[in-house]
Amino acid sequence: MHKIEVGVRFCETDLLGHVNNNNFFVYLEDARIRFFEDLELVKEDWNFILASIKCDFLKQVYFKQKLVIKSGVAKIGNSSFHLDQEIYEKESGEIVAKGSSVIVQFDFELQQSAPLSEDMKKQLEAYQMAAK
């Protein structure tokens, strides 16, 4: 699985002292973008759109905690792929959230989905997880 680490900033917490739910989507996005960059799926032009996203919140997270976000490909289609992500608290190793998204390669000129190249599919397959 692809991994990144993030630190929780004070501004990401709410009046209850824990990370606001919106910020989990920011963490997932940060990991997704790094995933795209590390796999070199995007060049000069950004050619992917987010078609669907979901996050299950499992534990509270607080200021100064370090998080590890793991991303793996669950399914590869013709023009899209499903990305599963898990957020862990670094010190304890406990899972704090699970996310999933559907990402579509998109032709902005034609305003429609575009097929993934064979090279893209091979890059994605390197991070494909075993079926559950």
Image (cartoon, rainbow, N blue to C red):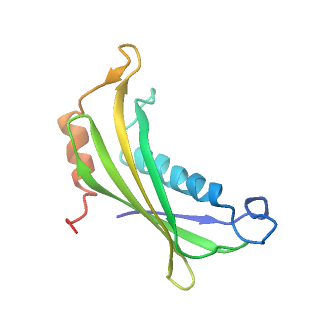
- Residue 62's place in the image compared with 107, above or below, is below
Q: Which residue lies at the image location 57% right of the left edge and 76% below the top edge?
A: 59
Relative placement, left or right, of 129 versus 69 is left
Instruction: Farthest residue to the right: give it.
Output: 15
Image x and y of residue 89, in percent: 56, 77
- Can the viewer see residue 40 in this picture? no
- Can the viewer see residue 50 in this picture? yes
Instruction: Farthest residue to the bottom: give it.
Output: 92
On the rendered image, what quadrant is the C terminus found in?
bottom left
Q: Which residue lies at the image location 59% right of the left edge and 52% below the top edge?
A: 26
Image x and y of residue 45, in percent: 45, 26
Q: Nearer the viewer, residue 125 or 16?
A: 16
Relative placement, left or right, of 67 versus 120 is right
Q: Quadrant of residue 21?
A: bottom right
Q: Which residue lies at the image location 78% right of the left edge and 71% below the top edge?
A: 16
Instruction: Farthest residue to the top: give it.
Output: 109
- Residue 36's place in the image compared with 106, above or below, is below
Relative placement, left or right, of 99 versus 123 is right
